[in-house]
Image: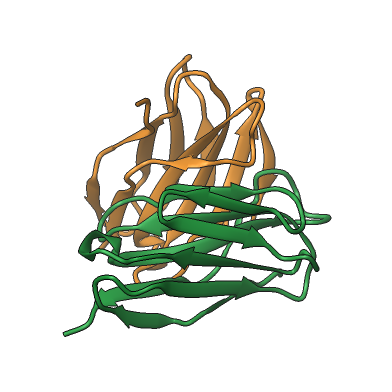
Amino acid sequence: EPEVTQTPSHQVTQMGQEVILRCVPISNHLYFYWYRQILGQKVEFLVSFYNNEISEKSEIFDDQFSVERPDGSNFTLKIRSTKLEDSAMYFCASSHRVRYNEQFFGPGTRLTVL
Amino acid sequence: GQQLNQSPQSMFIQEGEDVSMNCTSSSIFNTWLWYKQDPGEGPVLLIALYKAGELTSNGRLTAQFGITRKDSFLNISASIPSDVGIYFCAGLYKGGSQGNLIFGKGTKLSVKP
């Protein structure tokens, strides 16, 4: 069964450094998302992406964040200058053109900012 | 912002028991989704609901979209040890943007000691 994959599984970085989190959505999906989950808390929406542009973004997704689909398979989240409070699990999700509300999540990248 | 109130926060199960959990909101939702998350993993989609009153099953799981469109519940019948995990409700509310899933805080299922 096709699934969303994410790399790396764990990323440790120093405060102020840039990080890029990578995702490969399910191949025939057209909608892509990033969410984050701070340890022990609920999952929070960051951004949705469709047709090579951002559809919607939350208040969390400030100027330090950006997303890109550099080729036909990858979807990336970049944090330009990480802060301690950026430490969280970051989940990529994708959904099909037809049942686009059914979002399928990847296994996540645990980001630790020191 | 929109909030989903999920309860109970946690519960203990004994193998064979039925389990119920629910999600409520003050806002009207167009879509309800139920996910399960195991430790260190991403949420796995269990059931999607699209219409008020809709009752949908997936094996031993049954979920319903409330008539008022402000709530949903999930039942697990005859629980087994692998049902342990955190269950999240998530929804798209009326007037919200496409794709912006609002998540509840989760119901943690643990095995009764």
B106 above or below B62?
below
Q: Quadrant of residue A55?
A: top right
Q: Quadrant of the C terminus of chain B?
A: bottom left
Q: Quadrant of residue A22?
A: top left
A42 or A97, which is in the foreground?
A97
Residue at image position (35%, 62%) is: A87
Give residue B77's position: percent from left, percent from top: 40, 65
Instruction: Tell me the green chain.
Output: B
Residue at the top extreme of this rendering: A72
In the figure, what tint was chain A given?
orange
A4 or A58, which is in the foreground?
A4
Residue A82 is left or right of residue B73, and the answer is left
A27 above or below B92?
above
Residue at image position (46%, 71%) is: B106
Do we see residue B25 in this rendering?
A: yes
Give residue A88's position: percent from left, percent from top: 36, 61
Give residue B33's position: percent from left, percent from top: 57, 53
Residue at image position (29%, 53%) is: A110
Q: Quadrant of the N terminus of chain B?
A: bottom right
B60 or B71, which is in the foreground?
B60
Give residue B49's position: percent from left, percent from top: 64, 50
The colour mode here is by chain
Residue B96 is left or right of residue B32, and the answer is right
A17 above or below B70?
above
B72 above or below A45?
below
Do we see residue A63 in this rendering?
A: no
Residue A64 is left or right of residue B55, and the answer is left
Residue at image position (83%, 55%) is: B95
Residue at the right extreme of this rendering: B95
